[in-house]
Image (cartoon, coloured by chain):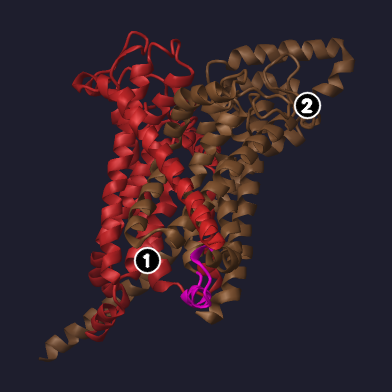
Amino acid sequence: MKIENSMVTFNKKKFRFSDWLAEKVIKAVAFLSIAVVILIFIFVFREAFPIFRMDNKVAASTETLVQESYGSEGTVKTEDKIADSQIDNSNKKHKSSDKPSSTLLSNTWMPVSDNPRFGLWPLFLGTLKVTLIALLFAAPISILAAIYTSMFAKPRIREVIKPVIELLAGFPSVVIGFFALMVMATVLQNIFGYASRLNAFVGGIAMGLAAIPIIYTLTEDALTAIPKTFIEASLGLGASRRQTAFYVILPAAVPGIFAAVVLGLGRIFGETMIALMATGNAAMISMNPFDSVRTLSATIGAEMAEVVFGDTHYNVLFLIGSLLFIFTFALNALAEFYFKNVVVRKYQSRK
Amino acid sequence: MNRNIKDKIVEGITGISVLVIIFIIVSILAITIIGGWPNLNWAFLSEFPKDGMTKGGIFPAIVGTAVMTIIMAVAAVPFGVITAIYLAEYANEKSVVAKTIRFAVKTLAVVPSIIFGLFGLGFFIGFVGKNLDSLFNGSELRWAQPNILWASLTMALLTLPVVIVSVEEAIRTIPRDMREASLALGATKWQTIRKVVLPGSISGILTGTILAVSRGAGEVAPILFTGAVYFSSHLPHSLSDQFMSLGYHIYIMSTQSSNVDATQPIQFATTLILLLLTFSLNAVAVVLRYRIRKRVK
């Protein structure tokens, strides 16, 4: 018996050690998500940073870049650059306009040319235009659909509607982009009769499709999170379901719906494949929703594979990535801390 | 009476919104099936592209997608499961650490996929790969270029939150009584997690894995410049090879192929395959998740 007892204590000690170790390992691994976010910050910014200090080194650094060139167009581009810098030397008027960081605020995006210009305005404007169209399409339709699902639909129908709309979230964006490119572009052109087949409007509607399941699901959650007593009180006072929905539930759920729209916005803003396939990809400054546009994310997607590693163009693309990252990070923080806290503070005591 | 009419109108408008969304979903499905079905046959699934990509099949793209998602799952699932265990079993909900980890996971879930691509390029290829090469290969270029390993790892980071969320949800459905019974019998916390919590959340882990694979198979932006290629004459046979992927194939064929009209049947059929793949995976996940939720009630 004694031997057994000692075995037990021995085992216990051993397992305590493994317990301690397990906890430490688990905790360390859990920190990985934080580490990844920080690493993304560091590495995306690191590659963007050089444009602010390499202005004078463009010509000097081209020779060393040849070995590191990435993609077949490398050599061609370097030749362009050398030719370009020769032009610069002979013509000093151009030199100041050729500084990459000084062209960032110009109105032309022309990264591959003798005198490359990296004006971000057309890209900003394009992104804004597409995002606005997508949001104007996706937000109302998803919010209305969520109201129907949570307020008017019979339980059995609701059980069908919810998973079907959530199916849309499982569509890869390249599939939605393909559908927009092949079908929607033609159909919408026939209806509205505009000139260019692929444009901000088609791209916006397609990106709206990608955002619908997000906005719908989160709005539906926000609506069903409103305490049952609110609804019962309203119905008990003789209000109809419509009146309850619009005067009781909707106002109470506004912060949650805002959070839903903000997260949908983040999805639209960063969407790459649909933008690449359906917006026409022409960087121009125009307010017409039926003109082709080029968004920030599509620019990265289209040009990164053909760029010289370490070149100014490469750095500018990373700069665009940093901007995208900051923006979605801020949107997420806004949705997470501001809106959710408002909802929680307002209703937690009444549950 | 007036009120009743208003009620009907509002109900009608909201109902129409639902119908419009469902109509769009159904038409995407229907058009893909109608366009892709006639070209779908065994040869299409088992052959390499031929005649400058205008004929032949998509075999390497299927294999490439499969291999990439397997490596991705091997990388993402263990980390995701452990993070979920931490969040559900160890973390103190009110501690700053737990809140920060939760916020980091949510951030990873909303960061645009193209940013992961940039990160893969800057970190895996430009930093890790470059240092590996200078350490082991001299000046020879092997890891400091796009390949299937870097693409899979980039995708693993993207799908990490998917795994974490589903596994944590499953862990939380395991009744408290079971944990307490185990602890009362003298088991330590780690033993309880290993013998009670993990076996109980197997279906959650499976759901998370399936959802991650489905997401990873469909995403294109992260692999645009971390490993996917337009055409490869052989299957990837080492981790430093580049690969073809279904999603990338659709993108390239529909926007940059030399003859977009002639290859339309291939494009539709590839889209159909990708959609079938992600759909069947999602359907399995939905069923599994439904069963987990039923356990709570």
Residue A107 disc label: 2
Q: Residue furthest front?
A: B1
Residue B185 disc label: none
Residue B130 drawn at (x, y percent): 51, 34
Residue, x 28% and y 59% (percent of image)?
B290
A332 vs A203: above or below:
below
Question: Dot 2, crowdedness within 10 Å: few (<14), some or many (≥20)?
Answer: some
Residue A1 falls in which quadrant of the image?
bottom left
Question: What is the three-letter code of the residue carrying label 2?
Answer: Asn
Residue, x 61% and y 52% (percent of image)?
A329
Q: Which shade of the palette goes to chain A? A: brown
Question: Viewed as shown, does residue A75 lie left or right of B19?
Answer: right
Residues A152 and A139: in front is: A152
Question: Viewed as shown, does residue A329 lie left or right of B83?
Answer: right
Q: Which chain is red?
A: B
Question: What is the three-letter code of the residue carrying label 1?
Answer: Ile
Residues B137 and A211: in front is: A211
Q: Residue furthest top?
A: B51
Magenta residues (range): A226-242
A260 vs A82: above or below:
below
- Which residue carries the number 1 mark? B85
Q: CA distance from mark 1 to mark 2?
A: 51 Å
Q: Is residue B143 visible?
A: no
Question: Dot 1, crowdedness within 10 Å: few (<14), some or many (≥20)?
Answer: many
Q: Quadrant of the C terminus of chain B?
A: bottom left
Q: Is residue A268 visible?
A: yes
Residue B271 drawn at (x, y percent): 36, 28
**The magenta stretch spans residue A298:** no
